[in-house]
Image (cartoon, rainbow, N blue to C red):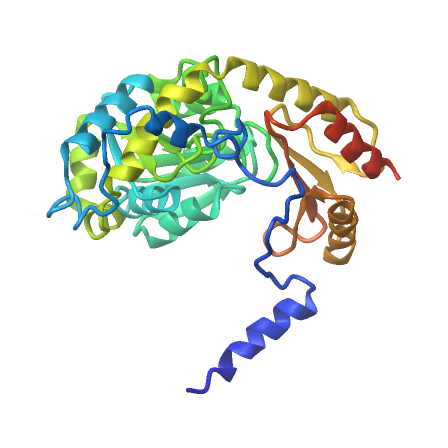
């Protein structure tokens, strides 16, 4: 079968020097992965599950939750997640992408308005694109622009943001956003993917850390980052849970996560809340990076995601290649993933990174 029609777009990507390839990590020092607390690196979930070797968890669920794929462990885990995150109800999804896509495509209706931060994750934006609601972005973390959008909104209004932004590492001004939502009767939806496990005394996320959980219509916590496994949960009211079970296509028409995956989620939630030393070490590394002098513009972030702006795909790829050659696994983020002129190194810090590794990294970024 002739598939040469694909070449035009592939050639365009190559001409932009933005062609993506899968690469192996090859034992380099990890400044790339989202394993912020080292749960995956140190196989903590496997060790935790191994403590109860008599329990054999199934690796298949045999169907969607509405058919053959529901089971006691899934429902018990949802109750546990709701309790930990101080929510009325919880519904597990197969991934953060599924959760965001499903929630935003099915809840807002024709005539409603979705207002989202311009830097919201692709999974949020894809869910918004599938919705029949009107949608408008507001400038990143810009409260005046958000209020302007709120003043013009019609129908039921939804405001969507991340708590910690995946490409910049900065935080949303959630207290002010929440106050605007209250003022204009809007429903706040917060994606906590990069805050889960990291932000708050027990890694509960930014919303709870700020005691704003009662002011959110929905929260999405994903498990593929600091939590160290797979899946996601949407938190909200019992009514929202029932609505998603009835109308959310990415939930209804997906084979459910198997017991083995849900057991891993459950095990992770017994681990990361107590990882206080790991979160403290992360903060030490963050402070060290933020105070280091380097030759390029550095983003302001007090999260594990640190950004070095090196404009141009050619230039940022060259910088990343030099770091890779020195054994440091740092990846470039290229246009069109980020705006032209905002190409960057996305440096991710972990509880297992040492200060010596940090000094090697920042030393190379000086020259």
- Location of residue 349 in the rendering, given as x and y in whole percent from the top left corner: 63, 31
Residue drawn at x 23%, y 21% is 88
- Location of residue 136 in the rendering, given as x and y in whole percent from the top left corner: 45, 45
Q: Residue 243's image quarter?
A: top left
- Location of residue 25 in the rendering, given as x and y in whole percent from the top left corner: 61, 48
Res 156 seen here: no
Relative to 137, does residue 210 appear above or below in the rendering? above
Q: Is residue 192 left or right of residue 20?
A: left
The residue positioned farthest toward the left in the image shown: 67
Residue drawn at x 59%, y 25% is 351
Q: Residue 309's image quarter?
A: top right
Relative to 241, does residue 180 appear above or below in the rendering? above
Quick one: 246 or 229, which is closer to the camera?
229
Tag count in the figure? 0
Res 173 seen here: yes
Q: Quadrant of the C terminus?
A: top right
């Amino acid at each position: 079968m002739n598939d040469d029609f694909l070449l035009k777009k592939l050639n365009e990507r190559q001409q932009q020097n933005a062609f993506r390839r899968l690469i192996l990590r090859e034992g380099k020092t990890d400044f790339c992965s989202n394993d912020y607390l080292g749960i995956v690196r140190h196989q903590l979930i496997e060790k935790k599950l191994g403590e109860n070797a008599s329990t054999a968890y199934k690796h298949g669920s045999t169907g969607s939750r509405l058919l053959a794929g529901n089971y006691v462990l899934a429902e018990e885990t949802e109750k546990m997640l709701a309790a930990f995150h101080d929510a009325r109800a919880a519904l597990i999804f197969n991934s953060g992408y599924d959760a965001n896509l499903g929630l935003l495509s099915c809840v807002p209706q024709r005539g409603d308005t979705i207002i989202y931060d311009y830097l919201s994750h692709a999974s949020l934006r894809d869910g918004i694109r599938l919705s029949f609601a009107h949608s408008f972005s507001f400038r990143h973390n810009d409260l005046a622009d958000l209020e302007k959008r709120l003043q013009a909104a019609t129908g039921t209004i939804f405001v969507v943001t991340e708590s910690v932004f995946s490409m910049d590492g900065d935080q949303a001004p959630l207290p002010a956003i929440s106050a605007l939502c209250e003022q204009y009767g809007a429903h706040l939806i917060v994606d906590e993917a990069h805050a889960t496990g990291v932000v708050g005394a027990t890694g509960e996320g930014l919303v709870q850390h700020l005691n704003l959980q009662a002011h959110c219509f929905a929260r999405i916590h994903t498990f593929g980052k600091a939590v160290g496994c797979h899946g996601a949960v949407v938190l909200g009211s019992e009514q929202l849970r029932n609505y998603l079970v009835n109308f959310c296509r990415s939930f209804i028409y997906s084979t459910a996560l198997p017991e083995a995956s849900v057991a891993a989620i459950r095990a992770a939630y017994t681990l990361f809340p107590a990882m206080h030393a790991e979160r403290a070490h992360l903060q030490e590394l963050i402070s060290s990076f933020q105070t280091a002098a380097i030759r390029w513009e550095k983003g302001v972030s007090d999260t594990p995601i640190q950004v070095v702006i090196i404009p141009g795909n050619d230039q940022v790829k060259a910088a990343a290649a030099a770091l890779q050659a020195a054994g440091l696994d740092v990846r470039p983020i290229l246009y069109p993933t980020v705006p032209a002129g905002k190409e960057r190194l996305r440096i991710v810090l972990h509880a297992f990174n040492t200060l010596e590794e940090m000094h090697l990294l920042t030393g190379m970024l000086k020259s």
